[in-house]
Amino acid sequence: MTNRNGNTTTLVMTALITALVLICTLILRIPCGPDCYIHLGDAVIFLGAMMLPRRNACFAAAVGASLADLIGGFAFWAPWTFFVKLIMTLAFGAFIDHIIKSDRNGKEIKKTGGIPNAEYYGLIVSCIIAVFGYFISEVILFGQWIGALACVGFNTIQVVVCAIVAILVSRSLYRSSLCETAYYHRPR
């Protein structure tokens, strides 16, 4: 998006995705432990990584999720969340960029269910990063790994559910006119 309207569209989409990450993390959450809760913010993060250029997607993910921690009473988690969501989005974005590069070079893109396998791999790697990142964060914050281990199951459920939601929503999104403004166009 090099023209003025493209830049404006990207800026507006970045702000929208940031706000949606915040809302879906803050409002749509289910407490499941003393410092754990399940939310749909990661689904929006995955969709943002598909819709936005990588730096904008990273901004939306890291800032939106960190703001949710600050506003939601988990301010001590905000810096950890910032880095976990940033790394998670960078990893997923790398897989998206691989698909884009392969498509441009005319390479065959293997798909399952109409979705490139690299998207699935990116989601799996991002989920592992999220679970491992929060485990390490909890070990550092609380000084014990047993307590951190208690949230691993909930964190795994949360990111896997969000990955599934992102796949399902992306299928509809890519059939709408909204995909015309997206950074990533899923190969047909």
Image: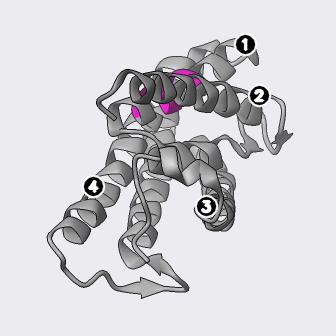
Kindly report the distance in space between the C-alpha atoms of the residues bearing marks 4 and 1. Answer: 33 Å
The amino acid type found where label 3 is placed reads: Ser
Q: CA distance from mark 3 to mark 2?
A: 22 Å
**Magenta part of the chain:** 58-64
Q: Residue at x 38, y 21 (%)?
A: 4
Q: Is residue 8 magenta?
A: no
Whether the residues at callouts 2 and 1 have beta carbons within 8 Å, the answer is yes
Label 3: which secondary element: helix
Callout 4, which amino acid? Asp
Query: Where does label 2 land, which residue?
Result: 26
> Callout 1: few (<14), some (14-19), or many (20+) C-alpha neighbours within 10 Å?
few
The mark that comes first in sequence, 3 or 4, is: 4
- The CA distance from mark 2 to mark 4 is 29 Å
Question: How many callouts does the rendering have?
Answer: 4
Residue sitting farthest toward the left: 105
Whether residue 186 is situated above or below residue 112 in the rendered picture: above
Q: CA distance from mark 3 to mark 4?
A: 17 Å
Q: Is residue 180 left or right of residue 68?
A: left
Q: Main secondary structure of the magenta part?
A: helix
